[in-house]
Image (spheres, rainbow, N blue to C red):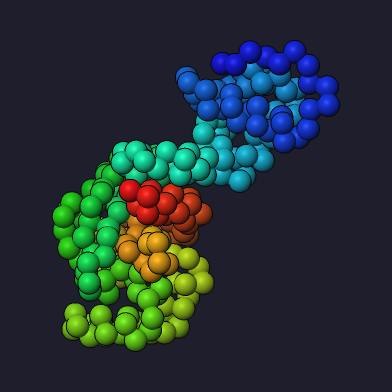
Amino acid sequence: MSAVRSSMAGSSALEKTLRIIEELSAPGGPHRLAEVAAASGVPKSSTYRILASLVEQGYAVTDGEGSYGIGLRLRSVAARVCAERPEGITELLEFLHKGTGHAVHLALRHGAALTYIRKVESGRPFRSPARLGMRAALHSTAIGRSVLAHLPPEEARALCRAAGAPAHAPGELSEVRELGYALDDAEEGTQAGAGAGSGAVRCLAAPVFGHDGAPVGGISLTAAAALTTRTELERFSPALLEAARGVELLLQRG
């Protein structure tokens, strides 16, 4: 912990927030509210208000019982700063898993297919059947659908034709672009780990873009349909999108 500042006179709201963030990221977390207030030199009532705002914005997380830790959004920012470290992607995916409890996948596009290159298994009584190195057609996965939605329409149709599959409706892909994510809602005929093979899996996926703005793959959250409703899964879309941006920057710089 850093030493308590001797004077808070004239401290701006920004200065107080930065001091709290410094203490929040100190070793030994999560930290109690009183601990953060004392170490930062910010009054406890002000510390509580600032922490509540940080939690709302995704920079902090709380257990609801007075302890606070680093949020996904702050970790994503840290990942951008430390982009030279290849392990940063794995750490970001693991944090997304810890924050959601669901299996996390990272897959990259190769032509009309995706290849799964990273996976963090769910801690629940459910194991995603996706395997590292497994290939899946774009049209049959939530990650693939998020990629198709950001390709030129003619290219997306051609990729589906090449795979012998009907093209997704323009309105469907337009909705994916608007939302920022694709959802396979326990649909038949989708691939394991990305969609809902045998109607038992729900998957939420967001695209990852390359330097030229073209989608190069995506990340997903996968859950058993019997254990997680569509609404419950979509509740994690902000965290998924934030993680996708962090992974995107790490890939671009790696």
Image x and y of residue 146, in percent: 38, 68
Q: Quadrant of residue 141?
A: bottom left
Q: Is 118 situated left or right of 203 in this image?
A: left
The residue drawn where x is 16% and y is 55% is 133
Q: Depth check: 155 or 104 in front?
A: 155
* Residue 23 position within the rendered picture, expressed as x and y whole percent measured from the top left: 59, 24
Q: Considering depth in this image, is 179 or 7 the residue closer to the camera?
A: 7
Q: Residue at x 78, y 16 (%)?
A: 7
Residue 168 placement, left or right of 53: left
| Residue 151 sits in quarter | bottom left
Q: Residue at x 42, y 51 (%)?
A: 249
Most extreme residue toward the right is 10
**Residue sitting nearer the eye, 220 or 81:** 81
Residue found at x 32% / y 64%? 216
Residue 221 image point, x, y percent: 36, 54
Confirm whether residue 221 shows in the render. no
Whole-percent x and y of residue 197? 22, 65
